[in-house]
Amino acid sequence: MEAVNKQALFKKIPAVDRLLSDPDISETTGSYPRTLVIKAVHQVLDHIRARIRDGELSVESQLSIESVSALVVEKLKELSLPSLRPVINATGVVVHTNLGRSILTDRALRQFKAIAGGYSNLEYDLDQGKRGSRYTHVEDILKELTGAEAAMVVNNNAAAVLISLETMAKGREVIVSRGQLVEIGGSFRIPDVMRKSGAKMVEVGTTNKTHLSDYEEVLGPDTGLLLKVHTSNFQIVGFTEEVPLSELVKLGGRYGIPVMDDLGSGCLVDFSKYGPAKEPTVQETLSQGADLVTFSGDKLLGGAQAGIILGRKNLIEAIKKNQLSRALRIDKLTLMALGETLRLYRDERTAVREIPTLRMICEPYRSLKRKAERLVKLIGKLKTQNFSVELADGNSKAGGGALPLLELPTRLLCLVPGNLSSRFMENWLRTYDPPVITRVEKERVLLDIRTIQERELKTLAQAVNNLATLE
Ligand SMILES: *Cc1c(COP(=O)(O)O)cnc(C)c1O
């Protein structure tokens, strides 16, 4: 009996041509490209068929031309939205890779329009009136800030590690501690990058302990590089030992083998001064004698996606000449954003104030508490059974593989379920316009104040009010 019903419903689905020639549809969809209208019609009809099949649609009136055209118009709006959209990060993870890592400083945003919307001296030497190098735009500032002999930038830090290994050790051996064979974000694994570079990885030590003698034992005529990798997103605690960089440098020096340190996050300021824990800075790493240092432009540095390579002039020159540099080269907009971010580091206090990533990580609890109170005030008194609002203490994270164990004390706005479940609220906020990304803990929806921007408070308060008035 039911199967017959479904068959009958399938027959009532309006035909594509019928829909496309309907005057109502052509009027409401007139401003959209014809191909998009056809796409929307097909998607809506596919969805209707699936719903009939699953028994979710059993009322014939839902198949009227009016009902279906309303769905087509909805679908067209959805298809016309940009795919990449701004979201509100209420997760409390400052450098959130899935949400775009770092927010750019206002200085970079101001330059964006000029550089993106016009020609620039990207690879043109204005003094000489001839071809220049794109790297010059950040080389000097990187050297000035870090004391490095030379600098080079590529598409991201994965690329920085790849091109450095390829240049230094293709067909040769690279010695690395077993405790540092990390995987970062699922697709970057030290052993895999090593293989791609054509270098042969020689693992030494054990997961928890590696001694200098372990390196020395395997050193030989084929050794091209000693590699140290920041373990980033995890930490081995307890009975552990790693060889300090300075010791590796001494060993390398004795045998004439360069030492490379992949710092991952690579920060230029000492965070311990501002509260959060100690992370080795780029300057310290270079002054300890690393021959090459690599790190990301959009983790703790707070700039755009890029990979920065610093170190000895002859090594950087060789990396620049590597054919891979063309394939891995940095885009002009990234280069501009990176340069503008780096220039702020000339005055550390300006950097901490104006680079959003640094500002958020260093924002003290008392200031977050006041921001939370402002949000509660904007939300106002809610007369709803849907949920209740509370403030609580919690912890945010730096993210991006930096300072993995560090917990930053923060304030949370909690939505405590009433008529609405926490799952429903999380999903509703995530599909709101703009989407609000939260986390659910102990049946509560938590919004971490640290990563919510001041300019987003009003929008967020409105979202909470809309959720409160849901029937
Ligand atoms: C994050 C990270 C990378 C990869 O950097 P991307 O900028 O994501 O390409 C490489 N090495 C370490 C140690 C990292 O933490």
Image: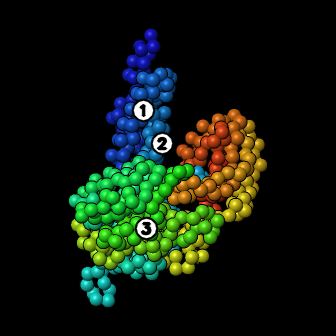
Can you say which quadrant of the picture contains the C terminus? top right
Q: Is residue 399 left or right of residue 258?
A: right
- Residue corresponding to mark 3: 247
- Residue corresponding to mark 2: 74
Can you say which quadrant of the picture contains the N terminus? top left
Q: Are marks 3 and 2 in contact (CB under 8 Å)?
A: no
Q: Which mark is residue 47?
A: 1
Q: Which mark is in front, 1 or 2?
A: 1
Q: Give the image quarter of residue 469.
A: top right
Q: CA distance from mark 1 to mark 2?
A: 13 Å
- Type of residue at label 1? His
Q: What residue lies at 56% left-to-right and 73% top-to-bottom? A: 351
Q: What residue lies at 61% left-to-right and 60% top-to-bottom? A: 453
Q: CA distance from mark 3 to mark 1?
A: 64 Å
- Type of residue at label 3? Glu
Q: Are marks 3 and 1 in contact (CB under 8 Å)?
A: no
